[in-house]
Image (spheres, rainbow, N blue to C red):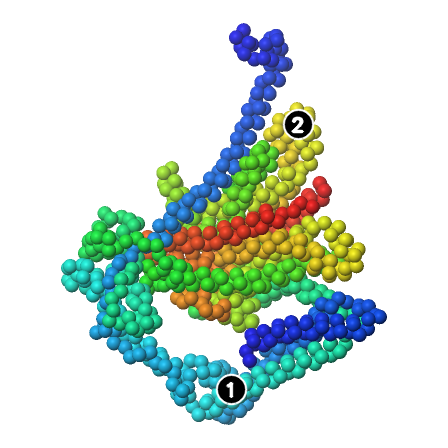
Amino acid sequence: MTIIAENPIKAVAAPSQVQQKVIDSLNRRHRKENLFRRLGLTAVLISLGLVAVLFINIFSKGLPAFWQSAVTLDIYFDPQIIKIPPMPQQRDDESDNDFRQRHIEWQTEIGFVNFNRLITDSLQKVLPDANKHRRDLARVVTSGERFALRDMVVADPSIIGQTRTLHLLTDANIDVWLKGNIDRSLPDEQQQLSAKMREWVDKLSADGVIQNRFSLALFMNPDSRSSLASAGLAGAFMGSFYMMLVVILLAVPMGVAAAIYLEEFAPRNKITDLVEVNINNLAAVPSIVFGLLGASVLIGWFNLPMSAPIVGGLVLSLMTLPTVIIATRSTLKAIPPSIRQAALGLGASKMQAIFHHVLPLAIPGILTGAILGVAQALGETAPLLLIGMKSFVASIPASPFEQASALPVQIYLWQGNELRNFFEARTSAAIIVLLLMMISLNGLAIWLRKKYEKRW
Amino acid sequence: MSNLSLIVVLLVLLALGYQLGMARSRKVATVNSDLRMHSRPHHYGMMVGLWAVLPAFFILILWLWLSPAIINSMMLSQLPATVLALSADELRVVSQRISNLANNFGVVADAAQWELDAAEHLRILKANSAMVLTSLMAVIAAVGMLLSLLKITPRLKARHQVERVVKALLILCSTVAILTTIGIVLSMVGETLKFFSYIPPSEFFFGTTWNPRFSTVGIGEQGSFGLVPLLAGTALIAGIAMLVAIPLGLMVAIYLAEYAPVKLRNTAKPLIEVLAGIPTIVYGFFALVTVGPFLRDLGAAIGLDINATSALTAGVVMGIMIIPFISSLSDDIITQVPKSMRDGSLGLGATKSETILKVVLPAALPGIVGAVLLAASRAIGETMIVVLAAGNSPALTANPFEAVSTVTVTIVNQLTGDNDFSSPQSLVAFALGLTLFVITLLLNVIALVIVRKYREQYE
C-alpha cells in the first residue's frame, strides 16, 4: 500500500495491468528523453571544452616565451678593438658602381671587427674565473647580439670609446636551462650546456645579472638560424602584411564588383547559373589547389618571383574572392527591393539606384564579409608552401617583390626546428600573435555587424 | 618616369578631367539655358576623366607588355657577330649581364668594351622608350580630354557612356572567378598530361606502392607512383575525422536547436564556431605537441601501440576542426524544419526526443547528408594538420595507429623538395592535385544539389 500512496496516478485505485504497462513505458520513455537531452548537453560541453583546451594549451605554452633571459652588461666600445675608417661618402666624380664597391669594402672591414670581444671583455668583469673557460664565455650571449653592437657603431660612430649598459639576450640553451624546460638532473653528456656554463648561469641569475625580460627581439627581428634566441617574427609579419594588402586591394574590390554585377545586373540565364555554381564550388576547393595554380601559372608562366608576397597575395586573393562575393551577394539580397524601387521611381538610373542607395546600406555587411575573408587568408599556410614561401628568409622584406615568409609559414618553420625545448614555446608565442590578430579581425567584424545590423 | 609615377599622373589626370568636365558642362548649361542637360554635371566630369585616362592606360599596358622583348632584340642586333653566334642560353646570360651593367645593378666584374657599349646602347634605348611612352600617353590623354570636352552639349548622353564603362568593369570582375576555375583546370590538366607522358595513367591510378625516388635517378628506374596508398591514407584520416565530428556536431546542433535556452545558444554557438576560424597550422601544431603524445601515452596505458604521429592523431584533431561545419549547417537545417511537423508529433503524445529522432531528423536528413558531405570534402582537402601529424609514411595500411600519408601531404612534399620542376617527381603533384580537385568537386556538387533540393522542399 505504501507504494500506491507514493504514486499519485496509482493513488486513486490499484492500476490495472494495462495501466501498469503504460506507466512503465512512460517511465522508460522519459528516461530515454533525459538520456538524449544529457547526451546533447555533453556534446556541447565537450565541444566547448575542446575550445578551452586548445586555447589554454597554446597560451600556457606560449606566454612564457614572450619573456626571455637577458644578461645586463656594461659594454665598453673599446677603440683598441673597433678600428674602422669612417663610413665612405659618395664623391662627385664617382659613379654609383664605384661607390657601391667602396661601401661593400667598408662593410667587409667592419665585418672583421671582433665585436664578440666587447661582450666577453665585459663578461669577464662579472665572472671571476672566466679566463679559464674562454670557449664557454663566448657562448653566453647569443651570437646575433654582436650584430646589434655593430649596427650601433654604424649608426653612431661616436659611441666608440664610451660605455653603455645593455641588456643582451642569452643563448637559447641558457633560456631553456633557466626556464626549467630541460631536466636539470640529466647527466653531463645529455645537457646542452657544459657544467661550468650551468654553474655560471645559475650564479648570474642569482646575482640578478641575468633576468627574464620582455623580449622585443621576438617582434623586432627577422628569423635567424645562427642565433636562435634572437629569431623574431618581424620578417614574417611584414610578409603577411604585404599579402593582406594585396588581398584587400584586389580581392575585396573585385569581389564586391562581381557580386554587384551578379546580384543586380546579370540576366537570369544559363551563363549566370554557371557562374553562380562555379563560385560556390570555388569557395570549397581545397586551398592547396590554389597553391598549385600559383606554382604553375604565376611562377611558371608569368615568371613572377618565387617566395614573394606579391605572388602569395595573388594566390590568397583568388582564394578569398569567392568568400567576398558570397558575403556581398547575401548582403545585397537582404536589402529590400523597395529601396531600389523608390530610387528608380524618382528617376534614378539603375546604376544610380545601386551605387547611391543600395550600396551604402550594404557597406557594413560587405565590410564584415571582407574582414572575415582577410582573416581566413591571414591564417592560410598550405598554398604558400607551394609557391616557395617555405624558404628561410633572414631579412625584413622592404617591398612585396622581395623574398619573405608569412606568419603561418613561420609557425610551420619554427615547429620543425631541432631545438625543440626552445622553439616549442616560441612557436606557441607566434601562434598567440597570429591568433590575437585573427581574434581582433573577427571581433571587428562582429562589432561592425552588431553596430550596423538592421532588420528590414 | 617610372610606371608607378605614370599611374599616379593618370590618377591626377582623372581628377583634372573630372573637374574640367564639370566646369565645362556647367558653362554649357548656362549658355544653353533654354535646353535641359541630359546628365548631371558629375557625369560629364566622369566622362571627360575616363576619356583622358582609359586610352592612355591601354597604351601603357600594351607598351609594358611588348616593349621589353622589342628593346632586347634591338640591343642584341647591335652586338658583334661573334657574340650573336652563341647559343640561345648563352645569349640570355649575355643580355642579363648587359642589362645589369645598364642598370648599374650588381658590380659586374671585368666587362668587355663591347659589353659596355651595348649597355650604353641599352640605356639609351630604354630612356628613349620611356620618353616615347610618356609623350605618347600625354598626347593621347590630351587629345582624349580635349575632344570629350568639346563634345559636351546638352544632348550628349554622358551618363550612358559612364555607366557603360562601369558595367564593363563589373562584368570584367565577375569573370575573374570563372577565369580562376579555368586556370586551375587548364594548368593542372596540362601538367598532368606531361606527367602521364612519363608514367601511364593505369600505373598512377591503380599502383599500390608510392616510392617516387629522386629526379636524378635514370628513366629506367624512376620509382613507382601508385595513388592507392595515398587515397587510402586520405580516406582513413577523413573517416576518423568524420567519426569524431558527426556524432559531436550533430548532437550539438540538435541540443542547441531544440533544447538549449536562448542564452546558452547565443553564447555556445559563436564559441564553438571559433573552432572553424582557427588556422589549420595551429591545429597541426596542437596535434603534434599535445594530442599525439597524449594518445600515445593513453595507448601505452591500455596496452596499445599508438604512434605519436598517426592517422588517429590527425583524424581526431581534424574531427575537432570540422565539428562547427557540421553543427552550424545542421543547426540551420534543423531549425528550417516546419514547426507544424513538431507540433503534430508532440500533439500525438510523443516525447521531445522521439519527435526529434522520428520526425525532425528524417525530415532534415537530406540537408544533414549535404552538410556531412561538405565537411568530408573539407577533411579530404585539409593539408597542414596532416603534414604535421599524420607521420608521412605512404604505406598501404588500415591500422589507424600507424603513420600514413595523404594526397595533400604528398603534393607538399613533391613540390617543396629539391626536384626539377619538369621531372615526373614534381609533375605528379599536379596529377594528385587534379585528383583532389575532382573528388572535392564531386562531393561539393552532390552536397549542393541535395541541400538545394531540401531548401525548395520547405520554402
Q: Which residue is mark 1?
A: B123
Q: Which residue is mark 2?
A: B346
Is residue B207 something that shows in the picture? Answer: no
Residue at far right of view: B34
Where residue B314 appears, as percent x and y from the top left, is 46, 48
Name the element at disc 1: helix
Name the residue at 38% across, 85% down: A91
Asked if residue B54 lies left or right of residue B390, the reply is right
Q: Quadrant of the N terminus of chain A?
A: top right
Name the residue at 18% across, 62% down: A124
Where residue A62 appears, as percent x and y from the top left, is 38, 50
Asked if residue A388 lies left or right of residue A423, the reply is right
Rendered view: B294 above or below A153 = above
Where residue B203 appears, as percent x and y from the top left, is 53, 60
Label 1 resides on the chain identified as B
Mark 2 burial class by Cα count in 10 Å: few <14, some 14-19, many 20+:
some
Rendered view: B90 above or below A172 = below
Q: How many marks?
A: 2
Kind of residue at badge 1: Arg
Give the camera-side residue of A72 and B112.
Answer: A72
Rendered view: B254 above or below B73 = above
Q: Name which quarter of the figure residue A391 lies in.
A: bottom left
Kind of residue at badge 2: Leu
Q: Pointer 1 and pointer 2: residues touching (CB < 8 Å)?
A: no
Label 2 resides on the chain identified as B
Name the residue at 82% across, 71% down: B33
Give the camera-side residue of A65 and A279.
Answer: A65
Discs 1 and 2 share one subunit: yes
Is residue B18 something that shows in the picture? Answer: yes
Name the element at disc 2: helix
**Looking at the image, is mark 1 or mark 2 earlier in the sequence?**
1
Image depth: mark 1 or mark 2 in front? 1
